[in-house]
Image (cartoon, coloured by chain):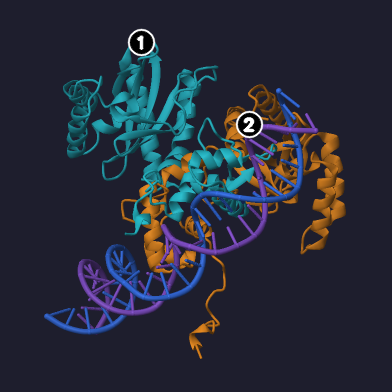
Chain colours: A orange, B cyan, C purple, D blue
Amino acid sequence: MIETQVRPADTAPTRRSSVERVHRLLSSFDYEHKRLSLSDLSRRAGLPLSTTHRMVTELLELGMLERDQHNLLCIGVDVWKLGLLTPKTYGIQRVALPFMQDLYATTGLPIHLGIPEGDKVTVVESLRPRAPGRERPRIGQRDPLHSCAVGMALLAFSDTNLQEAYLAKMSLDRHNGPEPQTVRRDLAQTRANGYAVNSIKTAPNIALGAPVLNRAGQPISAVSLVVLEGTATPPYGHLIRNTARAVQRTAWEQGIA
Amino acid sequence: MIETQVRPADTAPTRRSSVERVHRLLSSFDYEHKRLSLSDLSRRAGLPLSTTHRMVTELLELGMLERDQHNLLCIGVDVWKLGLLTPKTYGIQRVALPFMQDLYATTGLPIHLGIPEGDKVTVVESLRPRAPGRERPRIGQRDPLHSCAVGMALLAFSDTNLQEAYLAKMSLDRHNGPEPQTVRRDLAQTRANGYAVNSIKTAPNIALGAPVLNRAGQPISAVSLVVLEGTATPPYGHLIRNTARAVQRTAWEQGIA
DNA sequence: GGGCGCCTTCCGATATGTGGAAGGCCTGGC
DNA sequence: GCCAGGCCTTCCACATATCGGAAGGCGCCC
């Protein structure tokens, strides 16, 4: 009878609450798309143009979106200000930055700071020579824990149960990744040394990473130092380990961790 | 007839769209309230507890909110990552930071970076000795343009119409502020010098500020240097002005401005 | 042990957002 | 100069998400 009752077969059955719509709009922006027109935003978010239009109007009024000089839409300064409040990133970044700068000034080597997020590590800060094309890792980027020195430092000093859970999941959805057994051995070595060693695939470099622990002994972040392959690791390992300790000490003093 | 048409007199007539609700939830967090319980959040946002509960559940799933170790709610790392995309703050901060660090390393004096936002200046970066109690200005803080060297540098090199509009509004809602005529003279002096001079009320210091212009000649940010009152300004004025120029040059090269 | 605050879940009525469609405005091609 | 195809804006009937009270389960402190 009522033919229109039949779902158009293509109509997304996705339940889209209003907060999810806001999220879709905001997360349509990324590093390659910092500025979007209304239509582009509508397409990327998968929302009808009229809905996008209304919501964007409100977001502009609230300061969560802004218009640039070309009238394109971009994330508003208010969102940046909100982001300053995330305890996990901002606090530790403020504390670590001076020590990272000192290390960078004395060695001239790339320095990175990361925090754990589930089974990934998020790059929070990165100091390195400003060279065209060498913009990896990018701040905000997420990588698997076992793929970098920062991640290995975090994993090696995590609770044993977490380590085992991570290794178990690794061996499950493993595709061209390293052997869990290899990772397990590296983790033991990392704990013994006090710092992680990881060779970079894309360059003749190795990264040395050391963790920053909170008062409960859990790793809340890690710093890494990238040296040329063939460099004697012990002195540089001690260097990054001491930087991590200095950050940790300051974080404790300031109640960050 | 229909008595229920009478508004309950107390019922908030506030039109609360769903995006505004999301905004109210998120902006209930601030520097003094980085972590909130669900009930606190509900109260601060002025939203019913059941609504808050449902929306918070969704925001947690989407990563816009997180729970800390005490199960309190806080802004999620995803919001921090979104904030990295704001062109006005993040790009210029990345460019300016190395130059600010050099200046800080050589002089040991406090350095600040600000961007214009309407008739306010927002503090984007700040390097200074880590001393208890001296945590002003805070990053993210907004101040009137005429209240600081950074703001004056921005205003002095803005379009004349904007300056006049600002001064006009200043004289309108003026309360214990400085004479617009005084500000006007200071602006002229700033343009003549190439840097702004502003004495700090709360300390025996003066701040020197210089603008960073985009290719169109509009100020997109400004840096300032805080020196002791009585210091000979010219050499330090040149110093901060040169830092601003170096930032500007790099920003142009990288297409930031 | 009782009281209190917090979190969670349920529900019907209704206020609220939704999105198709249509119109205006520009720009670029022919 | 005119048409085509973007983009942005506005409207309105419909459907749906939201409100807010109430009730139950925790955990904590007095």
Task: Give the answer, above or below, for where C9 lies relative to B153.
Answer: below
Which residue carries the number 2 mark?
A107
Residue A65 image position (x, y, % from top left): 40, 51
Which amino acid, mark 2?
Answer: Thr
- Residue A220: mark: none
Q: Residue B220: x and y, percent?
A: 33, 39
- Chain of the residue on which disc 2 is drawn: A
- Place residue A107 in its image quadrant: top right
Quadrant (top left/top right/bottom left/bottom right) for the C terminus of chain A: top right
Q: Are marks 1 and 2 on the same chain?
A: no
Residue occupied by mark 1: B229
Left or right placement of residue B202 versus residue C10 in this view: left
Closest to the observer, A145 or B65: B65
Residue B255 shows in the view: yes
Question: For mark 2, does the 10 Å Cα neighbourhood hold few (<14), some (14 to 19), or many (20 or more) residues?
Answer: some
Residue B59 place in picture, x, y as percent:
57, 52
Where does residue A30 sit, x and y in percent of width and height?
Answer: 50, 55
